[in-house]
């Protein structure tokens, strides 16, 4: 038996690992590879194996770099079951349908360009129909229960604390009476994050596949997110202006709503109108609300103590679904907060809000997540005096700020603590570091070595890790 690393190997995108046990083939994640458009399209389209030969998929969580290429797998002949947690299935449904829409629009645009150049049109990576078919292949399960993936592969999900529904995948593999325990961290969250439960430590493993996004750094100490929100909202109230928060629709938006609700309930903030302007964020919040039992103890306490019993709602919070209502926000002249997507300001309604508000020095823009190089968000955050929106240049006059340490990924210390606990309790023979650039992986490998941990591997794409049973 072995694992072959086909994605998120020495990079942070396209998570996909092929597990082969007793002739059965199981994929751990099937994420979309994101990067240079052409390279990404080809990488996502051309699987390095026959999709029809895959027996099952185990999905760690709904983020698109872990789930986003499932419809391509299905389009290419995969007809097995996709195992995930219940919440992951619900969130994946939102995200895959949204992604299919993006694939269709992108493809139309590209084919128009190809037509002008006299080239043949290309089919899209996948379409809505593929995403719908993919969702019909899901089989959702709760945390902490063992289930059979295929003969020889038993599995159990543990809370990863990275996003709602995210799982650490524990696997017991059997081949010819030999047994191996393998743990796949998925994306590992952080202890004491708002809304989410803390990541669980798994006790027994011989092999660990662990993410190492932040293998080379420590996150800043508990930040002053709440203070920043209070300060900027009080400023908006004083100047009768707007606070615009670009945020990812799933996860970050709900965390901000949760924080704002807490600040208003505890009277640290005077009430202010808050608009969540993104149809996907509206749907995702509904899913969060339907899964309140998956949240942490603080959330449960607020459910009991708040008058309406809903920590994801407060007076003056408005969810905006229709585009015509979104447009009306331009003519709204009271102080308010607008939370909108996309998180990196590349597409979506946030671009309209930036266009209408970025030249007014009384307004503020508060970034709430990672801004990748060459994105509009990064451009603004880097302090450029002008920015291009819808092909036109605008002066950046609004106040620009950023919420620190809102990462959903464990840092170096937290990664070492998590895997260290497995090493103390189990009989770990090898740790493979994935979902990271080579640099952070190398730093973490050194640290793990210093801490006396077993052999650490930084697999490149296509590398095979043989899983030897305990003798
Ligand atoms: Zn993730």
Image (cartoon, rainbow, N blue to C red):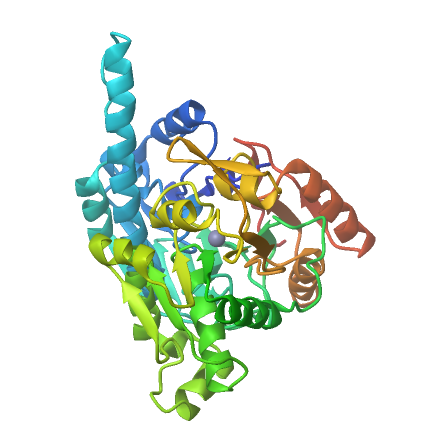
Q: Residue at x 28, y 56 (%)?
A: 326
Location of residue 193 by image quarter:
bottom right
Question: Can residue 116 be seen here?
Answer: yes
Picture coordinates of residue 119, whole percent (x, y): 26, 10
Location of residue 62 by image quarter:
bottom left
Outermost residue toward the right in this view: 450
- Check the image and report above or below for 425 versus 404: below
Nearer to us in this view, 221 or 423: 221
Q: Residue at x 52, y 71 (%)?
A: 238
Location of residue 278 by image quarter:
bottom left
Tell me: 295 left or right of 313.
right
Tell me: 227 left or right of 238.
right
Picture coordinates of residue 235, whole percent (x, y): 55, 68
Outermost residue toward the left in this view: 129
Question: Can residue 177 be seen here?
Answer: no
- Check the image and report above or below for 161 versus 359: below
Outermost residue toward the top in this view: 118
Nearer to us in this view, 22 or 161: 161
Q: Residue at x 39, y 52 (%)?
A: 341
Picture coordinates of residue 451, whole percent (x, y): 80, 57
Tell me: 186 left or right of 440.
left
Picture coordinates of residue 250, whole percent (x, y): 39, 59
């Amino acid at each position: 038996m072995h694992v072959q690393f086909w994605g998120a190997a020495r990079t942070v995108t396209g998570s996909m690992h092929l597990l082969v046990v007793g002739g059965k083939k199981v994929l751990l994640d099937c994420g979309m590879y994101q990067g240079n458009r052409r390279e990404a399209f080809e990488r996502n389209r051309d699987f390095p194996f026959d999709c029809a030969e895959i027996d099952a998929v185990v999905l760690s969580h709904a983020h698109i770099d872990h789930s986003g290429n499932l419809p391509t797998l299905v389009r290419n002949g995969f007809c097995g079951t996709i195992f995930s947690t219940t919440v992951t299935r619900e969130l994946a449904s939102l995200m895959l349908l949204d992604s299919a829409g993006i694939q269709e629009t992108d493809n139309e645009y590209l084919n128009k360009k190809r037509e002008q150049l006299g080239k043949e049109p290309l089919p899209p990576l996948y379409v809505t129909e593929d995403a719908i078919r993919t969702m019909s292949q899901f089989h959702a399960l709760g945390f902490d229960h063992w289930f059979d993936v295929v003969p020889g592969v038993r599995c159990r999900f543990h809370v990863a604390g990275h996003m709602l529904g995210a799982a650490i995948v524990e696997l017991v593999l059997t081949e010819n009476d030999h047994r191996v325990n393998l743990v796949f961290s998925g994306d590992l969250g952080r202890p004491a994050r708002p809304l989410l439960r803390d990541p669980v430590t798994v006790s027994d493993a011989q092999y660990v596949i662990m993410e190492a996004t932040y293998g080379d750094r420590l996150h800043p100490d508990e930040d002053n997110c709440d203070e920043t929100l209070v300060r900027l909202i009080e400023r908006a109230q004083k100047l009768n202006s707007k606070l615009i928060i670009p945020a990812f629709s799933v996860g970050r938006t709900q965390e901000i709503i949760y924080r704002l609700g807490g600040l208003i309930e505890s009277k640290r903030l005077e009430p202010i109108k808050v608009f969540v302007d993104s149809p996907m964020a509206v749907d995702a919040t509904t899913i969060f609300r339907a899964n309140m039992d998956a949240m942490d103890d603080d959330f449960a306490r607020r459910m009991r103590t708040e008058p309406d019993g809903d920590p994801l709602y407060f007076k003056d919070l408005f969810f905006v679904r229709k585009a015509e209502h979104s447009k009306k926000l331009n003519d709204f002249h009271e102080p308010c907060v607008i939370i909108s997507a996309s998180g990196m300001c590349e597409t979506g309604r946030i671009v309209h809000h930036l266009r209408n508000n970025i030249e007014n020095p009384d307004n503020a823009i508060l970034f709430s997540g990672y801004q990748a190089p060459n994105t509009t968000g990064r451009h603004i955050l880097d302090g450029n005096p002008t920015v291009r929106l819808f092909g036109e240049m605008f002066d950046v006059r609004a106040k620009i700020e950023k919420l620190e340490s809102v990462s959903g990924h464990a840092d170096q210390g937290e990664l070492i603590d998590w895997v260290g606990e497995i090493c103390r309790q189990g009989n770990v023979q090898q740790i493979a570091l994935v979902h990271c650039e080579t640099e952070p992986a190398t730093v973490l490998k050194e640290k793990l070595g210093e801490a006396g941990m077993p052999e650490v591997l930084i697999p490149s794409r296509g590398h095979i890790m043989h899983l030897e049973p305990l003798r």
